[in-house]
Each structure stands twice: as structure tokens, then as C-alpha cells.
Image (cartoon, rainbow, N blue to C red):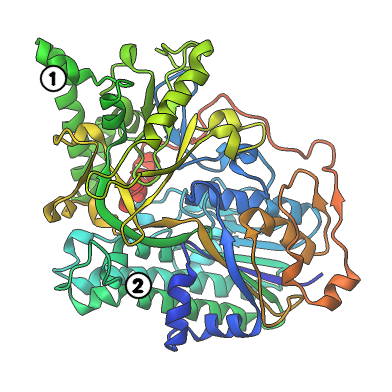
Amino acid sequence: MHRLIVFGVDGGTLEIVRPLAAQGLLPNFARVMEQGVVGELDSTFPPMTFPAFTTFMTGKNPGGHGVFDFFERVPGRYGVRFVNANSRRSRTLWRMLSEAGRRVSVIGFPVTYPPEPINGVMISGFDAPGIGARADRSCFYPASFYDELRGAVGDYIITPTVDMLRAHEDPSEGIGAILDTIERKVRTALYTQARERWDCFAFMLIESDFTGHRYWKYYDPNSPQYDAGAPEELRRGLPRVYAAIDQALGRVMAADPEAGVLIFSDHGFGGASTKTVFLNRFLQQQGMLKFAADNCDSGSLGARLRLGGRLAMARLKDIGLHYLPETLRTPLLRSMKIGNQIESRIRFGGIDWRKTIVYSDESPYFPALWINLAGRESAGIVSPERYEETCARAADALRAWRDPETGRPLVRCVYRREEIYRGEQVERAPDLLIEWNYDEGGYSYLSGRSLEDNSGQSVRRLAPHEFLTHEMATRGGSHRPNGMLMAMGGPFAGRGTIVGASLSDLAPTILFCQGLGIPQEMEGRVLAELFNPAFLSAHAPQRIAAPDGQLAPAAAEAPADNYTEEEREIIERRLRDLGYL
């Protein structure tokens, strides 16, 4: 068994790391790439943070662990609820290590709230509530570690707070908040490392993803959103944050130089176009969806009022999330019933279900399609006998959809959920998943809400002033399927390259490094290419059955998120600040 440091870099990409390392800005990443093993790491499909990190922790695809998005559908309703660890239907790597007697420290990983009891300490990540982005006692296991850590290094900050509409006015404010958050997290990590010699010390920084969404458009001169007149401080934002993460890596490795280090990201990153697709508008134009407001021309004042109220509520919510002080924000948003109910209305409230056979939640990055299936949806009209026919009709229409400027297909491929996912949780996934093509230059199309756009078009280029909102100001960069993987020291090989690695391979690989067998339930493989020949000759990966009673937790009928209204508002703002809502 070898002690191991697992260092997560949310959205980390070799497209940034390699050139910055070549410029001498990332000496620690450069050393690992030179002395260890490096390569790309395949993410989940689509490459989203919550399902990706859950795949890392379980060794399963989303069809096996049950986390597909930041939200999950409420069975039998046109509604959504926030996802957290209660949505996960599989054992985690941390639990398996703990049950084998390994001492484990886990800091900052998403989809770990509420924290699970492990043989060590855990601080929940992105899905944890906390007033002002400060983690409270509920985010810690054991809870006593909260008081200990707070007394030693201060509050643990979950995410930085950045107002991108102030970026030009005060360019140092946002980057300063991000760098301060990284430093606070590193102090937490170093304090925790100093407490004892952990068998597995896992630490994750989300700030690379946070910065990619906001500052990619300033860093990349070829980006359609690039602003040549932006302050130099904004253009240097992305390199500065990666440099801070590089320093964090160096400090964590120096705290336990005998441990092996495994560095990975949940997905990659790239730039975003100025073109936006409006998926439900496209479905309407294809005769597969009808908006309630479509009845307005025939004199339906009620439909107009419902649509106007829905849009007004969305605007008021944005004002409440970003402009009011917290002492006023929470009461106001509670009175608006912020959270799952409001998000459900914004996503689904304007659709006439009696005349709709296919619809989308129009999520900002990777929208998918659902069939309005009778017996599953509360107002479903597609009979089970017509399910396959309806899926095929929608898929054919998507494949024929063209960019009006270039004439190129917008959609690369349409998949049935069974083609992508495997396992007992597949039925929780959307019916059809879309692999989008990139716009010219390799930039991602954006996704917009059809009922908040009055152009009537299903795809169009946004004007510069349309990016001057809190939501669109965070949409300069988008996820890519190719993350990164590095390993150095301990049992790992030197000076090598790895290809074909996947997120689901990391949990089996970590268990193997810790001298444990690989449960049959895990889909991934041990990445033997990472290890030196001596270690492989002395250790052979073994598959083992899960002990009785140690399989995945049973699905619960109760809402998975278990947040209070105040906590939902906190998570809502965090997701919206990242552009995920």
C-alpha cells in the first residue's frame, strides 16, 4: 500500500496547463508532467461537474449511480429538485477505503453534502449550503472538525463571490476574490495534512472551472466574445488562477513528499460562441411542442398573464440573487418560494402539455429532450406504443437542424439514453441526449430559454449588449469532454503518456494503489499504465464481490435535496453564478 494525494482540478485542461507550463508559469505541473505520467481523461456524457465527480467517486457511469445533472426530475411532475449526495445510488470510494481501515481526508468534492461518515474527515463541496459561501457545521464530518478548523485557519469558503458586471469597473475585485478563496482552501488542506499521515488525502479546487466560465473570453484572442479593449488584468485572470492552483499543488505535495500524487479533472474546458440555440422554439417550429402563449393570438388573456408573470418572477429572482444584501435577500426570495418550485416553473411553466409531445429543460450548456409520456408525466399525451416513433421523429429533426449562417449541422449525434448509460438508474435520465457540433473555430453553442427570447428564432447570434446580464456574463467558456490526468511518485511510473483513460477508472486505480480489491460493481479498470513495473509485478488487481448489505443505497421517494428554503436560495445563487441556471 502507498499513501496517496488525490488532487482535483475542476475543469482543468491541458489546453491551458501545457502552454502556461512551457512559459514557466506552472512549475509544479511542469515537474509532474516531466517526471510522471500524463494524458487526457475522458469525462461523462455530457461532461458536467455533478455526474462526472460522482463517476469518479463510484467507478460507475451515471446510469449506475443516478446523478445526471445539477437537478433531477421529480417523478410524475414537471418539476425539478436540487441534486446532492442523497441522489447518489452507489457506494463511494471514500466509504470503501474507510471500511478497509484506511485513514481518509476528503476536502471540497462536489456531491458530498451531506457528508458521509468516513474513517477520517470530510468537508463537503459545491452542493453544501452556507451563508455567504462559508461552510457551516453541517458541511463537516465529524461536526467537531468545524470548530477545530475554524479556530485554526478561519472559515472554510465554498466558492468565491464574483460580480462579473463589475469586471471592467474593478477588474481586480473578481480575481482577488478567487485567489483569496484558493488561499483559504489551501490553508485548510495544509492544516488537515499536518494533523496526521493520511492513507488517502483528497483535495479539490473548483476555482479553475469558476474562472474558465468567466475569464476564458478575456484570455482567448480568437474567442467570438473576446474584448480587445478589456483591461489587462482581465486577460491575465485565467493564467493567474492556474498559477495559484499550481502553487497549491506544490504546497500540498511538499507537505507529504513520500506520497504518490494523482492529479485529475472532471472535464476539460474551451471557449463559447456568441450563437445561442433555443431548443424548445425549434421543437415548436417542428410541430412537436406548443407554448401556452401561442393561444394569445386567439384572445387568451390568461395565457398572456401567466407568461408575463413567469418572466417577471425570473427577473425578480435575478435581482434578488445578485443585488440585495443577504439580510433582505432571504426573506424576499422565501416570499417568492425560491428554489425547486420556482426553477421548475421557469423551466416548464410556459408549455401547453396538452399539445406537446417532446420538450427540453433548456439547461444552459447541455440541454436534452424528454418525451411527454403518458403514465410517466402528469399530463403526458404520448402513449407507450408511440414512444419509439416519437423518439425517432425528434432525433431526425435534430439531425436535420442547420446553423443559418454556415449551413452546417448543429447536432453531431442524438442518442437514446440506453445507448449512453447502463445500470439500474437509467430511467432517471432524459430520453434523448444531444451531442452538439461546435461553431466555427471550435466554440460551443450557447443554450437559451425560448420563452425569454422574443426573436422567434431557434438559433441566432446574440448582440454584445445581451451579454450584460449576470447569467450571460458567466458564459464565456464551456465544458469539453477531455479532462486531464497526471501521476507521479510513490508507485507511479516515470516519464510516460497514458491514453484511453476514463473517469470511471480512477476509483479502481486508487483502491489498487491502497492495496485493496476492486468491487465487481465498479465499471472502470485499474490504469496499469500509471504504475511502475516493480509495483505491478508485486501486486495484481483483483475483483471482489461487495459484502452483504454493502451495495448501493435504496432509492428514496422523499425529495433528495433535503435543503431548507434558505439553503436552496444559497445553492441556487451558486449555480446561477456559474451560469448553470
**Sooner in the amino-acid sequence: mark 2 or mark 1:** 2
Label 2 sits on a secondary structure element that is: helix
Q: Is residue 537 left or right of residue 195?
A: right
Mark 2–mark 1 CB contact (< 8 Å): no
Residue 509 percent coordinates (x, y): 73, 61
Which mark is on residue 157? none
Crowding at mark 1 (Cα within 10 Å: few <14, some 14-19, many 20+): some
Task: Kindly give the residue lying farthest to the bottom in the view shown.
Answer: 24
Which mark is on residue 238? 2
Label 1 sits on a secondary structure element that is: helix
Residue 478 visible to an observer of this rendering: yes
Q: Quadrant of the N terminus?
A: bottom right
Q: Is residue 479 left or right of residue 8?
A: left
Foreground pick, 381 / 131: 381
Give the alpha-carbon distance from disc 2 to disc 1, as whole Å: 44 Å
Residue 177 percent coordinates (x, y): 32, 68
Report the residue at 31% width, 74% height from top.
237
Circle 1 sits on which residue?
A: 304
Position above or below: 243 against 530: below
In which quadrant of the rendered view does residue 91 lie?
A: top right
Q: Is residue 447 left or right of residue 461?
A: right
Report the residue at 55% width, 71% height from top.
189
Residue 293 percent coordinates (x, y): 18, 20
Report the residue at 51% width, 42% height from top.
84
Q: Quadrant of the C terminus?
A: top left
